[in-house]
Image (cartoon, helix red, strand yellow):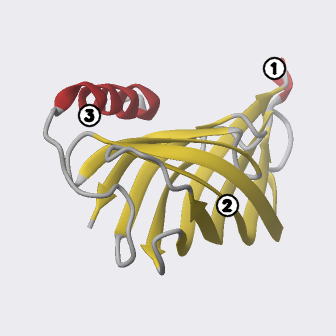
Amino acid sequence: MNPIKTIGAAAMVLLLGSNNSFAQSFKQGDKLLNAGVGIGGGLGIPVGVSYEQAVSDRISVGGYLAYARKKESYNEYGEWKYSYILAAGRGSYHLKVNSERFDPYGGAMLGYNVASVKWSGDGSEPISASAGGFMWGIHIGTRYWASQKVGAFAELGYGATVLNVGVAFKL
């Protein structure tokens, strides 16, 4: 099952799904969960979740956790396999807009990237190594609430990915 196609299809259903009106799109006390996939940024295709707690009507804080992997093949010689575990804290400022469905925001994150690499090829012993380092990122994004509890999100940014899309939930 392709995670990009699955999340994309779910997001389309959510975007086209509901006509009910409801209260303000972002307010103090909200607890939000995003589940999505990233595109671009050099780490492969990260699959991750983020959680945010609204500490005011404009500010949210929370965390981000993702996993990504990619391969570089060198024909018949072998291949490098990379994997990344990303963990970060994040904060966002939510813009005030005249809409019950849209929640535009921008923010930053700071965290750690645990990376590992493995070489496998004919006639050679497998080689592997692990490393890690601090990571940071910035993002602008929006959520579209198809109902009071379920919606879709998209974020553009620098850091873990260039584009992050998926499904959003109010807990």
At label 2, counting other C-alpha atoms closer than 10 Å, the crowd grade (few under 14, some 14-19, many 20 or more) is: some
Q: Earlier in the sequence, mark 3 or mark 1?
A: 3
Indicate left or right for 76 with 19 as reference.
Answer: right
At 45% from the left and 71% from the top, the residue drawn is: 57
Comparing 75 with 51, the one in front is 51
Place residue 107 in its image quadrant.
Answer: bottom right
Amino acid type of disc 1?
Answer: Glu
Q: Secondary structure at mark 3?
A: helix
User: At which x and y percent is residue 165?
Assistant: 50, 39
Furthest-left residue in view? 20
Q: What number of labels is visible?
A: 3
Which percent across, then down, holds residue 22? 19, 51
Circle number at residue 76:
1
Q: Nearer the viewer, mark 1 or mark 2?
A: 2
Q: Which residue appears at 62% of the width and 70% of the height?
A: 91
Using a 10 Å C-alpha cutoff, classify the residue at mark 1 as few (fewer than 14 neighbours), some (14 to 19) or many (20 or more): few
Answer yes or no: do the residues labelled 1 and 2 have beta carbons within 8 Å?
A: no
Q: Is residue 131 visible?
A: no
- The relative height of residue 116 versus residue 3 in the rendered view (above or below) is below
Residue at x-position 26% and y-position 34%: 14
Rendered image: mark on residue 107: 2
Secondary element type, mark 1: helix
Could you tell me the amino acid type at mark 2?
Gly
In the image shown, does 140 or 38 lie closer to the viewer? 140
Disc 3 marks which residue? 14
Q: 9 left or right of 112?
A: left
53, 160: nearer the viewer: 53
Which image quadrant is residue 111 in? Answer: bottom right
Whether residue 35 is visible here, answered yes or no, is yes
